[in-house]
Amino acid sequence: MKKLNVAIIGQGRSGKDIHGLYFRGEKNVYYNVKYVVDRDEYRRGVAEEIYPGCVTLSDYRELFDKCDVDLVVNASYSEDHYPITEDLLSHGFNVLVEKPFGRTRYECSRLMKIAEEKGVTLAVFQQSNLAPIYTFAKEVVASGKLGEIKQVSVRFNGFSRRWDWQTLQRKVAGGLYNTGPHPVGIGLGLIDFDPNYKVVFSRLDSLLTSGDSDDYAKIIIEAPNKPVVDIEVISADAYCDYNVKLVGTRGTYKSTTLKYKMTYIVDGENPERPVIETSLEDENRNPAYCREELIKHVEEGDFPGDAFSVGTPGLYEHLYYKLTEGREMPVTAEMAREVISVIETVHAHNPMPVKY
């Protein structure tokens, strides 16, 4: 198997500790890190140590005269995702861009158009849509165990605060742009990225952050004949015990990123009871509450990994075969564009004052 040469732009937390961790790991049998780009001299030095034989560059434009680059990973600052990706695509490079894909739907569409015109591959790092938290939920829905799904709830909440560049609107940051692509992507995926979806309610606020961006986001999405999708990205929620919950006509499923549990009933085991229009009484004619013990089934288990240990290798494997054999990827730029469309809509409905 021929390895593809990769150039990584950015050696921050994402470029070094997410993408780089994969490239340095045993699951990477597909890629060779040939170039690393970072403006910081120290980080370039570290890259030379952890990627033996790589060439380090201070400016991504130095890649333009390199003929041995099969893929560029754009792990730059969020506000640079669009302009750098546009420049790379225009120069004929295949690009994997970190989330967020862009600030607006227009930016995403523009990048997709350039990629099509140049005949190159454009992929987006929406690896949560390949993680067990998502793929197993899809299997549960398809199994019918829960009956007809009526509500999908996705919570990427916690109790913490930030004071770095990820708190600034001008950096295309904030909880919804930074963390939001994961739950929004999962929520849309669980209604099959229905093209007729609508954001019917949303709210943004700032609770703990030191900057001027959001760290509270509430979104309700609806689509015809689909379950209601309820999404949260909240920094001051100390008691959220799940990431995904499915409520169906026969039961409920919930999971964190590492484990799941579901409780449901089976047709025929709990025969329908006729409606009694009068008040219920016990054997002594005392008022009684309407209750019964349903025959229920409970399943629970652990996932084999999360978005990083499973989703990242999975995305890179699919991308390898897209680049070498033209196979379709299960997570597409079109899907990632819809994620940004939701985020753009929510920001348009909830403008926050720019302070920095």
Image: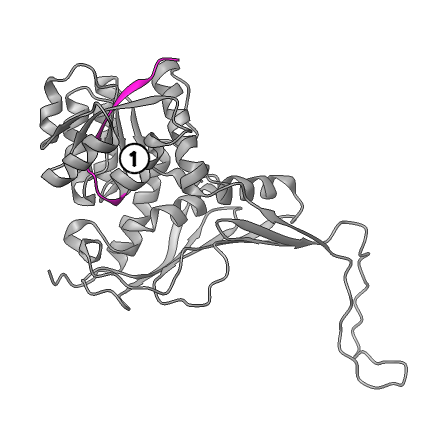
* Magenta run includes residue 5: yes
Q: Which residues are magenta?
A: 1-13
Vertical side of 157 occupied by 119: above or below: above
Q: Residue lying furthest right in this view? A: 283
Q: Position of residue 185 (x, y in %)?
A: 40, 44
Q: Residues within 10 Å of mark 1 (few under 14, many from 20)?
A: some
Decide if residue 33 is on the left or right side of residue 240.
left
Q: Is residue 117 visible?
A: yes
Q: Quadrant of residue 86?
A: top left
Q: Residue at x 81, y 53 (%)?
A: 269
Secondary structure at numbered mark 1: helix
Q: Residue at x 29, y 35 (%)?
A: 20
Q: Position of residue 199 (x, y in %)?
A: 37, 52
Front residue of this view, candidates 218 and 223: 218
Q: Position of residue 21 (x, y in %)?
A: 33, 36
Q: Amino acid at mark 1?
A: Gly
Front residue of this view, candidates 66 and 137: 66
* Magenta run includes residue 155: no
Q: Is residue 345 visible?
A: no
Q: Residue at x 46, y 40 (%)?
A: 131
Label 1: which residue?
Answer: 20
Decide if residue 333 is on the left or right side of residue 56.
right
Decide if residue 263 is on the left or right side of residue 304.
right
Q: Quadrant of residue 161?
A: bottom left
The image's colouring method is one colour
Q: Residue at x 46, y 47 (%)?
A: 223
Q: Position of residue 301 (x, y in %)?
A: 61, 48
Q: Quadrant of residue 325?
A: top left
Vertical side of 105 occupied by 29: above or below: above
Q: Quadrant of the N terminus?
A: top left
Q: Quadrant of the C terminus?
A: bottom left
